[in-house]
Amino acid sequence: MPQGGKEHGSLDPDETRYVSYFQELDAWTEYWDIYHPGTRGRYYFGDGAVEAGLLTRFLPREKVPPAFLAWKRLALYQETYDRFRTEVSVPSVAEAVLEVDELISRIFREHFTNA
């Protein structure tokens, strides 16, 4: 029997919502965004041609963006919060963070409308 004592497929409605939410979130980060013709990797790391991808603005992929370096240095107490704020306030970075956040918020609202 699976962990928690429940047989597979006997999830209660709340558990089903959680599973559904994480499956969709995982699908967006691992499949839909990359292969969906409409987004062409916009929310991830791009399509390797036209779309660079929003995450490239603040997470390492082929290079380490200044916003990530500032976050890392802040986490290691090597930098001030002001420096981090400056880097994440760069319009292209702030726009990317907000757009990715909106995707995650939309998926959350779809699964937890009464939360």
Image (cartoon, helix red, strand yellow):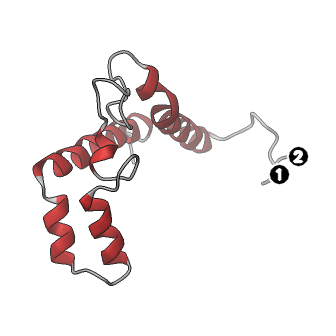
The residue type indicated by label 1 comes to Gly
**On the image, which quarter does residue 82 sit in?**
bottom left
Query: Considering only vertical position in the picture, is 111 above or below 97?
Result: above
Query: Considering only vertical position in the picture, is 87 above or below 22?
Result: below
**Image location of residue 28, percent across then percent down:** 45, 33
- SS label for mark 2: loop
**Image location of residue 19, percent across then percent down:** 59, 40
Tally of numbered tags: 2
- Judging depth in this view, the residue of 71 and 103 nearest the camera is 71
The numbered dot on residue 14 is: none
Residue found at the very far front of the displayed protein: 63
Q: In this rendering, would 89 be left or right of 45?
A: left
Residue in the image at 82% along x and 51% along y? 5
**On the image, which quarter does residue 74 sit in?**
bottom left
The residue type indicated by label 2 comes to Met
Residue in the image at 38% along x and 80% along y? 76
Residue found at the very far bottom of the displayed protein: 77
Do tag 1 and tag 2 residues touch (Cβ < 8 Å)? yes
Q: Give the distance between the C-alpha atoms of the residues marked 1 and 2, in whole angstroms.
A: 6 Å
Q: In this rendering, would 12 be left or right of 50?
A: right
- SS label for mark 1: loop
**Image location of residue 60, percent across then percent down:** 38, 53
**On the image, which quarter does residue 110 sit in?**
top left
Within-10-Å neighbours for mark 2: few <14, some 14–19, many 20+: few
The numbered dot on residue 5 is: 1
Query: Considering only vertical position in the picture, is 72 above or below 80?
Result: above
Residue in the image at 36% along x and 42% along y? 104
- Judging depth in this view, the residue of 6 and 45 nearest the camera is 45
**Image location of residue 45, percent across then percent down:** 38, 37
Residue found at the very far right of the displayed protein: 1
Within-10-Å neighbours for mark 1: few <14, some 14–19, many 20+: few
Q: Which residue is mark 2?
A: 1
